[in-house]
Image: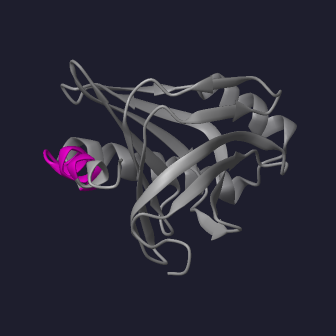
Amino acid sequence: MDGLEPGSRIQIQSYKHNGQLHRVWDTTTVLKGTTNKVIGANDKTLVTESDGRTWITREPAICFFHAKYWFNIIGMLRDDGIHYYCNISSPFVFEDQAIKYIDYDLDVKVFPDMTFSLLDEDEYELHKEEMNYPKVLDKILRKNVNYLLHWIRQRKGPFSPQFVDEWYEFFLTYRS
């Protein structure tokens, strides 16, 4: 897919349901890109928040986006193992050299032993009211939380034992 060739560099842009830009990761290297799936990697990349604050990621991360599922998965390589941060979000779109998605607040944090916590339920409920999420959207998001938890329990996709390590090794071939 144009712009998603392995080795190309793209941005990741997260929005809120009301269209407001939420967060931007400045540079991510594409490792695999198709119309349905993007696997990327970054390390010490600049992140800009909606209020203008910036910070730099601390560790290498493998990012997984899918055009069918309402979540994305970030596997972070830390000294004590792989930690995952999963955003419940719209499926991604790719335009203007950026992966774009709507962040729906609910997050799942997964630890190296594959235990997990569902986060930000209060923030989700607040934004659901403030931004008038339709009932059908709430159902879709809840169903995709269940899909994601199934993936975690089954060690499917990015949660499979070698996924992050193998893609990280591939990422290293693009670093100078």
Q: Between 68 and 96, which is closer to the camera in this rendering?
A: 96
**In the rendered image of this protein, does residue 49 appear above or below residue 154?**
above
Residue farthest to the left, as pictured: 161
- Magenta range: 157-169
Q: Is residue 76 left or right of residue 65?
A: left
The residue shown at (50%, 28%) is 57
Residue 107 in percent (x, y) is at 51, 34
Quadrant in which residue 46 is drawn: top right
Residue 120, above or below 160: above
From the viewer's perspective, is 74 left or right of 121? Answer: left
Q: Nearer the viewer, residue 142 or 59?
A: 59
Q: Is residue 21 magenta?
A: no
Residue 124 % position (x, y)? 67, 33
Total number of numbered discs in the rendering:
0
Decide: is 81 above or below 13.
above
Q: Residue furthest top?
A: 80
When asked about the image quadrant of residue 104, the answer is top right
Front residue of 73 and 129: 73
* Residue 86: percent from left, percent from top: 45, 39
Q: Main secondary structure of the magenta part?
A: helix
Q: Is residue 122 above or below residue 134?
A: above
Name, please, the residue furthest toward the bottom: 1
- Residue 156 percent coordinates (x, y): 22, 53
